[in-house]
Image (cartoon, rainbow, N blue to C red):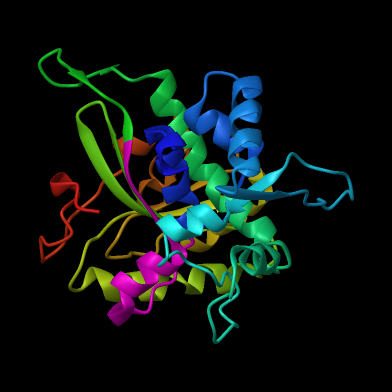
Amino acid sequence: MFRRIVPRDRALLGLLAEHYLLSTTQIAAAFFDSRRVAQRRLTTLHRLGIVHRFAYPNAEHTAVPYLYTLGPVGLQLHPDAYTDPDGRHPKAPRSSIELARRIAASATAAHLLGVNQFFIDLIAAARRHPALAGTGGGGAAGARLVRWWSEQHATDVYASSGIRPDGHGIWHAHDHTVGFFLEHDRGTEDLPRVVAKLRSYARLAEFGPRYPVLLWLPTPDREANVLRLLTGVRTPMPVATAVHGPDPAGRIWTLASDLPASPGRRRRLHELPSDHGPRSGTNPGRYNH
């Protein structure tokens, strides 16, 4: 059984262990050259008990592509996988089926899919452009997502600051490496509460990395309102906003500190400022995971 699991399968299982669930479309974008090939392989993995799959209705009550979680074999390989997306279960699931049911019934499942899509789009961008031209000396620098931590992982590592990012990543492109924290906004919270989340990142910046906080917003109007609240507000870490879209690595980010002097300026992800902070233990240049 285990001999039938190829390195690509193991990479997929590692993502499911950290991030709970991924859709067929997301898995295809991250690991395969075509959706059809992805579907065939995922069907095989499902039949072998390596992954579970289930259909998940969206807000329009129509079926979406299958969502995948760890199956019994996958859970054997990752016994320390995250198992409680809602943070309300005191005990670990007794089986992979219970884990899949817990994830499927989670109130945060749609949010998780949105967060995971952001990072999958970065992986897909790196696959499309594996050798982007460097900015210095005319050399080449591979685009890659060096790190992708879940909310639970980042919250545990930076517990002393009280941050609860939806995800943490390190992105490398054009000879630049940028650590960041993601706040994936679905428009369900009032804006003052969204902005209030920045206080814990400010505490982190006192002793840890001063990575940009990315406010990933659902509409241009909401972004404009957030930027209005942030204009003229000084923060010890960079804050950048953008509207949900398929290319988070692209020239879509507005840095709050650019306002009001440069209201129309948009930056690529790798162009955002990123400071390791007073302590270098989380220096993204070390690519520690």
Residue 283: x %, y % from top left: 15, 54
Instruction: Tell me, yes or no, whether the highlighted magenta stretch contains residue 153.
Output: yes
Quadrant in which residue 45 is drawn: top right
Question: Magenta span has 165?
Answer: yes
Residue 154 figure quarter: bottom left
Task: Identify the image quadrant of residue 105.
Answer: bottom right
Q: Name the one closer to the observer, 254 or 13.
A: 13
Pick the quarter of the image with the C terminus: bottom left
Taking the image as drawn, is residue 248 in sight?
no
From the viewer's perspective, is 173 left or right of 84? left
Q: Is residue 205 visible?
A: yes
- Residue appearing at x 24%, y 49% in the figure: 274
Q: Residue furthest bottom?
A: 90
Q: Farthest residue toward the top? A: 138
> Measured along the vertical axis of the image, is residue 217 above or below residue 156?
above
Locate residue 84, reporting x and y percent.
56, 72
Residue 46 image position (x, y, % from top left): 64, 43
Q: Which of the pair 24/80 is nearer the observer?
A: 80
Q: What range is drawn magenta here? A: 145-167
Judged left or right of residue 244, residue 134 is left
Q: Horizontal placement of 103 versus 287: left or right?
A: right
The residue lying at 53 percent from left, 69 percent from top is 83
Residue 209's x, y, as percent?
Answer: 22, 62
As rendered, which of 258 and 162 lies closer to the eye?
162
